[in-house]
Image: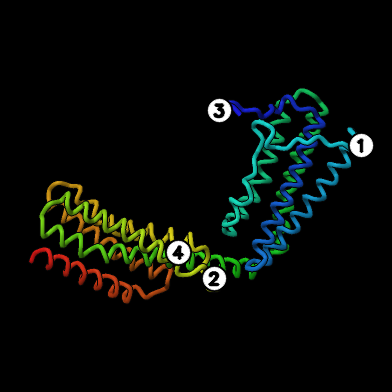
Amino acid sequence: MLPGISFRRRFSDLSEQEILAIAISSEEDDARIYRTYAAKLRPDYPDSAKLFEEMALEEDRHRRKLIELHLGRFGEVIPLVRREHVAGFHMRRPIWLMENLGIERIRAEAEAMEHDAERFYLKAARRTGDAQTRKLLGDLAAAEAAHQSHAVALEQKHLAAESMESEKRTSRRQMLLTWIQPGLAGLMDGSVSTLAPIFATAFATHDTWTTFQVGLAASIGAGISMGFTEAVSDDGELSGRGSPVKRGIASGTMTAIGGLGHALPYLITDFKTATAIAIAVVFIELWAIAWIQNKYMETPFLRASLQVVLGGALVFAAGVLIGSG
């Protein structure tokens, strides 16, 4: 394929038979996606899994009706035309890009699938002058709208208040284990462990550029180290802590951010100004860590503050004393 040239067909060039063929293949693809969602959610979210199983069955019923319509109008041979063959058609993400989505995002993706299909058919119906084609596209749009209404009804049927609350707790717990805990550990390590080398360098040299270079190296190095350590420490299979790659990214990124927060001020050439801003950033970082511990880890705020601020102050003091000496 030549770069910049699209070989997808225009919708206006399709026949009514080809439009019907796309509708059939789309219903089949969507049913497969819903079944994949159900299989993914079944271990932790059984009620939502039932929801997607029934949505898949609904797509099957619509596909069978469309096939019956095709048999009546055009015969048994259905053209091999899929939505990815048509320019401007709503596209579905490859399923492997959605395997790590959370439950709320999966529900949103499913709603968007039905809404996008309805919107496409309505837009296509307005652009055609053929009465039969317009009617066909209008019927397909109405079917997609009915899918959305049915999805709401199924959610009310399967997801009682108790189930929704239970699934929210499970989802929150997974977020804590996969993202919050590793990220918080990284932020604490990056913010506290880099205090001594950065401020020791600052007070020893009074050179802002050298201090920034030391801070940058310490932050990036600590981020890489923490990220790899977190990723290889637990594959998540038994502990349920989730993907090691996600945890490694969360830990490594937040470690680097924690160190860079008080290293970046030393890009300012005036030593006193840079140091004053860096110290202010340190206190903001330490209080932010205490707030995160209180909000997400349910650690009493006073205890979290004493632990983080006191520990950070001791490391900061050590760096200043070593640098000044």
Residue identified by numbered label 1: 72
Q: Which sits in the foreground, 13 or 51?
A: 13
Q: Earlier in the sequence, mark 1 or mark 3?
A: 3
Classify residue 128 by image quadrant.
top right
Would you say the residues marked 2 and 1 are in contact, meaning their CB atoms lie under 8 Å apart? no
| Closer to viewer: mark 1 or mark 4 | 4
- Distance Cα–Cα, label 1 vs label 4: 57 Å
Q: Which residue is mark 4?
A: 231
For the residues bearing labels 3 and 2, Cβ distance under 8 angstroms = no
Which SS class for mark 2? loop
* Residue 240 badge: 2
- Pointer 4 local density, CA inside 10 Å: few below 14, some 14–19, many at least 20: many
Return the x and y of residue 232 as percentages of the image width and height.
45, 66
- Checking the image for residue 252, the label placed there is none
Residue in the picture at 18% in, 54% down = 211
Residue 198: percent from the left, percent from the top?
20, 59
